[in-house]
Image: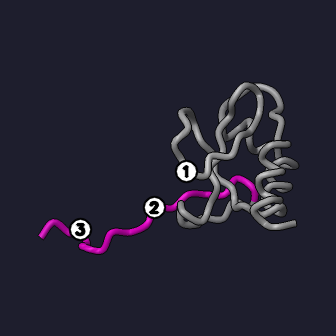
Amino acid sequence: MSGRTRIRSCPERTCVGCRERAAKNELLRIVAIEGACVPDPRGTLPGRGAYVHPVPVCLDQAVRRKAFPRALRVPGPLDVMALRQYVEQAQGC
């Protein structure tokens, strides 16, 4: 036997806000496009991605810690208005 299990495990990612690991399908992928953080719910946009729980608390923590520019490897601050609107709409706030 090769030691591999037959059960296919779900890939995990780390939330840049709370730093907790979660299944990839529980997190929202974020990409940087023209100086702004853009939500990528389907995970198909090109470029480096960062993951965050789609809740305002984790989003606020990531912004406060300046985690998006660091995780996405871009210089300077990023605009998070589109991302904030998406998260608030998803939460029904």
Q: Which corner quadrant of the image does residue 66 belong to?
A: top right
Identify which residue is drawn at 82% across, 67% down.
Answer: 92
Q: Is 79 situated left or right of 74 in this image?
A: right
Locate the C terminus and report the quarter of the image it occupies.
bottom right
Residue position marked by numbered label 3 in the rendering: 4
Residue 16 image point, x, y percent: 70, 53
Residue 87 image point, x, y percent: 78, 57
- Viewer-nearest residue: 40 or 23: 40
Q: Which corner quadrant of the image does residue 45 belong to?
A: top right
Q: Is 24 situated left or right of 70 in this image?
A: left
Residue 42 image point, x, y percent: 55, 50
Q: Which mark is residue 54?
A: none
Local secondary structure at mark 1:
loop
Local secondary structure at mark 2:
loop
Mark found first going from the N terminus, 1 or 2: 2
Task: Report the amino acid beneath label 1.
Answer: Arg
In the displayed structure, 5 sits above or below 39; it is below
Please report the bounds of the magenta region as a residue range.
Answer: 1-17
Identify which residue is drawn at 77% across, 63% down.
Answer: 55
Q: Which mark is residue 42?
A: 1
Task: Report the amino acid beneath label 3.
Answer: Arg
Task: Give me the C-alpha separation between circle 3 and circle 2.
Answer: 15 Å
Q: Which mark is residue 11?
A: 2
